[in-house]
Image: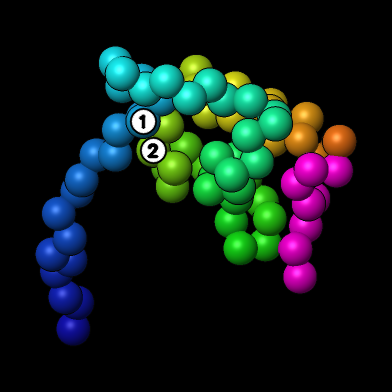
Amino acid sequence: MLTKKTTIPFKKKCIFCKKNYQTEIDYKNIELLSKYLSVKGKINSRRVSGNCAKHQRKLAHQIKLARYLSLLPYIQK
Ligand SMILES: [Zn+2]
């Protein structure tokens, strides 16, 4: 028997688009960037993080930069 899904769709909003959000997305801000990494160290998708395209692009770029400077791991076991 198929059961109907009763999940209510809930739209996440990009926190960086908020008016009074001061924090810049920066490769030195490891605390912020690590929030957008999965358990295995991969970058969370837009569907998961809820960011807009513009900020997701910037975030991914800054994470890659931080990885290159070995501030963040490429992969976690
Ligand atoms: Zn945004």
Closer to us: 29 or 53: 29
Quadrant of the rendered image containing residue 16: top left
Image position of 31 (left or right of 71): left
* Dot label at residue 15: 1
Q: Is residue 36 above or below residue 55?
A: below
Secondary structure character of the magenta stretch overall = loop
Q: Earlier in the sequence, mark 1 or mark 2?
A: 1
> Circle 2 sits in a helix, a strand or a loop, which is it?
loop
Q: Is residue 10 above or below residue 5?
A: above
- The residue at 63%/34% (across/down) is 29
Q: Is mark 1 within 8 Å of ligand 1?
A: yes
- The residue at 48%/25% (across/down) is 23
Q: Is residue 44 visible?
A: no
At label 2, the amino acid type is Gly
Give the labeled residue for mark 2: 50
Q: Is residue 76 above or below residue 2?
A: above
Disc 1 + disc 2, Cβ < 8 Å: yes
- The residue at 59%/44% (across/down) is 31
> Circle 1 sits in a helix, a strand or a loop, which is it?
helix
Q: Which x, y percent locates residue 28? A: 70, 31
Q: Which x, y percent locates residue 74? A: 79, 50
* Dot label at residue 41: none
Range of residues picked out in magenta: 70-77
Within-10-Å neighbours for mark 1: few <14, some 14–19, many 20+: some
